Image (cartoon, rainbow, N blue to C red):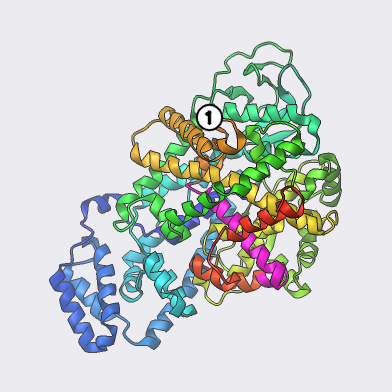
Amino acid sequence: MVLKNILIIIASILFIFSCTVNAQQAKEEPKIMITDTIKNELVTRLVEKYGAAQKARIEKGINQAAALWTKEDGTPEEFSQFCLNNYLGDEKMLNESFYRIETNFETIFGFFGQINREISEPLQLDVGANLPIDYMFAEFSPDTHFFDDLYKTKVAFVVLLNFPIYSLEEKIALAPQWNRLDWAKARLADMFLSRIPSSAQQKSVSAYVKGEDYISNYNIFMHSVLFNNKENLFPEGLKLLTHWNLRDELKSHYANPNELPQQEAIFSIMEHIINQDIPKCVINKDNVLWDVTLNKAFTMDKKEAANCEAENDMRYKYWLEIFRAEKNFDQYYPTIPNFIDRKFKRSREIPEEQVKALFESIFISPVVADIGKVIEKRLKRKLRPFDIWYAGFKPQAASSEAELDKITQEKYPTVEAFQKDIPNILIKLGFDQKNAAFISSKIEVDPARGSGHAMGARMRDDKAHLRTRIGSKGMNYKGYNIAIHELGHNVEQVISLNMVDHYLLSGVPNTAFTEAYAMSFQIRDLDLLGLKKASEDDKYYEAINSIWATYEIAGVSIVDMEVWHWMYAHPDANEHELKAAVISIAKDVWNRYFAPVFKIKDQDILAIYSHMIESGLYLPDYPLGHIISFQLERYIEQKGNLAGNMIRACKQGSIIPDQWMKTAVGQSISTEPMIRSAEEALIKLNFKKK
């Protein structure tokens, strides 16, 4: 998985969302002060000069510029003169201006990205104790006023006047006839959807920084956990970050059926976190014992700990702060005054209704219930709620955690060892030596404080960064598995920045696509260690595992989506009310989509994911990533290797998802290949009769 890094959030806010103005001025100055009479006169004069063929572009450009022109920008007369002087009716001049803007933006965004990355390193990397000043710098962003400056210099208005902004519906309709330059120009226009005050920007950055810091330090020291009068369930020094490491630790115990108590203990810990009755003194502390069954904290000599009250809904307070920061942006988006719509229509460029329909097709598929029955037979017990993370279909579940840890710790004792091996990893994945050398030269590995994440570069002269956690004994298997996932992100980032034809098309359509490639790398982790021998059965097991994993994370995503709708319906709610709503929604989603399979009702486990707290409506990208990844995998299986197809597909850049997928695999995003493959796999593995 990828930890949603705050610097990527900052980049998204600035790159996709907005332009900035002084907050007080934004309240006092009207945004629209150009009359229809002035606009009509301008259209007439410019059409007379450049011809009727340009009328539609002229009208759209004048309306776009007029909508964001304020008294601070000039008088109506000055607006008219600006339009007459700066409308680029000559195609050669229009294109030359576009290329100049594109080049300049790469320089500006590239260096801003470097600055943001480096000043946040004390919080992001395991490089020593944090200082109070580090938190202040983490909330500082040198690019906060950049778009404001673009308006003051009128660069923004040149873009608005000359490059049309297209809705998602228009892009879908025009995609078949657009060339690469058309797409790049559309992406330039996408950057100027509104003017957001710098004060609002700063509040958003602050909310995300605080949320991520809260989550990145939410560790549980498992050797201090007591459960059902049992001690030493977990090895000394085992420190697990919520939710990622807790979940992965739970999954690792499917390799041994006798380790059900460990899974039950982790499940109970998750319940305490969700319900926020977890004692504060056990969070990120290794000098306190926690009896999870009694939910009481004790000193190391078994005396009840003093002054150790419950966390009391802090988890939901951070979520609310991010909601309020995003909702505050609504007033600056007259055409999309809702963060949920902006997330789906502008960020993902997939309508929310389509996303829900994709998830629903998984929930209602009979194959999910069939897989649930198979899991029960394999476990020789009834399904438990945490079996949403059943890992027995994955090849690594057959190997012990200790054996895998030994292999990865010996192979990667340091960050430098993993860095040095990246070219070899890429060659094993099918990249030729030239591409492997180039891509690896653009990736730098850092020691992470959290579980790990990938941070792409924002200009071609910079490097992508892979943050991974490596302990004193070396990289354990969980850390390795995450690192390979993050490497998939980095490789996509390098290709889609350095191999695209336009800087403004760099990247992939949305986060789900980079998640798809990260997952494609991750499922090959044992292959890369030389431990997994390819077989026909492995393919079938992977098909079953893929749909079960998608089923789980789609449920979590629906919770995330429905909670955001609830927050919009209850904007004045406090953290205690939000907690009650989240738990209620989680239980409702469980009862709709999981209780029919698990035969257990009213479970809230779907609310454990930390992304809900530190990120804004990020989770739907994961099931979308699973679905897209499966389609890509099936195409690769039929047409060639991962590396060649990855380069070909990622070189398309950030066009809309539907068009990207049609070019990459010949069809729109669909769950049909995943469902069909899982049904076939159950029959091939004799889990179900024809």
Q: Which residues are magenta?
A: 616-645
Is residue 626 covered in magenta? yes
Vertical order, 232 against 555 (above or below)? above
Is residue 470 visible to the viewer in this orientation of the structure? Answer: no
Q: Quadrant of the C terminus?
A: bottom right
Q: Residues within 10 Å of mark 1 (few under 14, many from 20)?
A: some
Percent across and percent down for residue 362 are 56, 50
**Placement of 261 over or under 538, stated as above or below:** above
Q: Which residue is the site of mark 1?
A: 602
50 and 243: which one is in front?
243
Q: Is residue 640 left or right of residue 345?
A: right
Q: Secondary structure at mark 1?
A: loop
Residue name at image x 63 percent, y 58 percent: 676
Q: Residue furthest front?
A: 690
Left or right: 170 as drawn, with respect to 663:
left
- Residue 274: in magenta span: no
Residue furthest top in the image: 303
Q: Is residue 527 visible?
A: yes
The image shows a total of numbered marks equal to: 1
- Residue 59: horizontal and vertical position, in percent? 25, 76
**536 in relation to 550, above or below:** below
Towards the viewer: 479 or 640? 640
Q: For the point 33% across and 70% down, which residue is it?
A: 160
As drawn, is 343 to the left or to the right of 35? right
Q: Residue at x 67, y 21 (%)?
A: 290
Residue 368, position as x, y percentages in the image: 62, 46
Q: Residue 336, how many percent across, how many down?
A: 33, 56
Q: Main secondary structure of the magenta part?
A: helix
**Three-letter amino acid code of the residue under disc 1:** Asp
- Residue at coordinates 30% horizontally, 74% vertically from top-left? 161
